Structures are given as C-alpha cells and as structure tokens.
Image: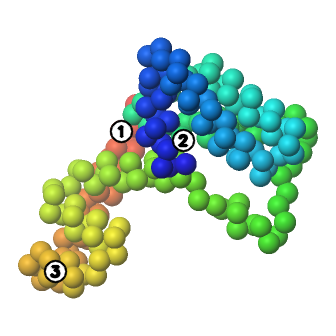
Amino acid sequence: MIAQEAQYRDWMLAALMGDAGAYRMLLGGLTRHLRSYYARRLDAAAAEDAVQETLIAIHTRRATYDPALPFTAWVYGIARYKLIDEYRRHKRRATVPLDEAADLFGHDDATDAIARRDVTKLLDKLPPAKRQLVKDIKLDGVSVADAAARTGLSESAVKVTVHRAIKSLGEDLGEDLEKRDADR
C-alpha cells in the first residue's frame, strides 16, 4: 500500500478541504484495501461489516488525521481497533495454521514508513559528511573500504567517524526521551 500512500494522502487532504470527488476516490480505494485486510482475518460477512465500520470510523474521525504522519498508518490503526472489536464481539481468537505462522510477522508498510521517517529525522541531526557515512555503512551496507575510498579517509577514520556519529545520536535520543518524560 506504500505505493499509494501519496495518492491517498492527497485525496484525504483534498477531502478535508471539501472536495467530494476526492473523498469518493479515497473511500473507494480504501474499501479495496480494507476488504483484503479483513478477508484474511475474518469470515466474509464479518469482513464486510468490519470494512463498513472502519469506513464510518474514518469518516467520523477524519479531522484527527495529522498530515505530517503517514496516512496509511492512521488508517491501519483504525482498522486494527475495528478488528479487535470484531474479535471481542464474537469472543473469537485468531488462529493460524502452523505453516502460515510466518504471515503473522508479515511486512507492515505503514510501520516501515514511520520508521524511515524517524531514522531520517534522527540522521538530519548529523553534519552531511557524517550522515552520509552512517547511511552508507549502517543502512545501505557499503563496506568500510568502499566508503573510505569514496571519501578519501582511511578505513580507521571511517570506522571512528561512524562510531562517534552513532554514539552522538544515541546521546541525543536519550536526552530527547528524558526531556519528553520530564514534560509528562
């Protein structure tokens, strides 16, 4: 769904500004995705009910959407709560055959988008040269030797720079968390 994140977000923002056509497009696209989401987890009738309840919840809570955050994460958050409500209503527990257990830990595009945003925000605190080295080595898997050749630094200097940059980010993150906890 990540490929359609931008389109859904644009439709949502247009809908919030009063564009009824964009809102119809958004709800139509979301209906297809939600049917797929619920079809794997519920029987057909319950899945359709859950789709409708989710669309109603999206409609009633549309003003709570924060455009700074990924739209699909917001939608899937609502969908997960509706799924839990459905399980509770029918006192069901989700069961998965053992050979399908890997699907329980499937790929969640919304979570990935949030993580990418957080990592980018964190890396933006570094100077450009250090940021590029951390991205190359820790995120893109470039070897230390290749990074050293690319930057003109020694391999030892690359290792030390990356180590210090990550340590600095960890300290900044710790300070941010302490500050947030103190504000509570």
Please, what is the three-letter code of the amino acid marked with disc 1?
Answer: Lys
What secondary structure is found at the residue carrying circle 3? helix
Q: Closer to the camera, 184 or 132?
A: 132
Cα gap from disc 2 to disc 1, whole angstroms:
26 Å
Whether residue 135 is visible to the viewer of this picture, yes or no, is yes
Residue located 29% across and 77% down the image: 142
Dividing the picture into quadrants, the one containing residue 48 is top right
Q: Is residue 17 above or below residue 136?
A: above
Contact between marks 3 and 1 (CB within 8 A): the answer is no
Q: Is residue 174 left or right of residue 154?
A: right
Q: Position of residue 129 (x, y in %)?
A: 14, 63
Q: Position of residue 40 (x, y in %)?
A: 77, 52
What secondary structure is found at the residue carrying circle 1? helix
Q: Nearer the viewer, mark 3 or mark 1?
A: 3
The disc, 3 or 1, on the residue closer to the chain's N-terminal end is 3
Q: What is the residue that sits farthest to the left in this orientation?
A: 152
Cα gap from disc 3 to disc 2, whole angstroms:
38 Å
Task: Kindly identify which residue carries mark 2.
Answer: 73
Task: Kindly identify which residue carries mark 3.
Answer: 148
Task: Kindly identify which residue carries mark 1.
Answer: 179
Q: Is residue 18 above or below residue 163?
A: above
Dividing the picture into quadrants, the one containing residue 79 is top right
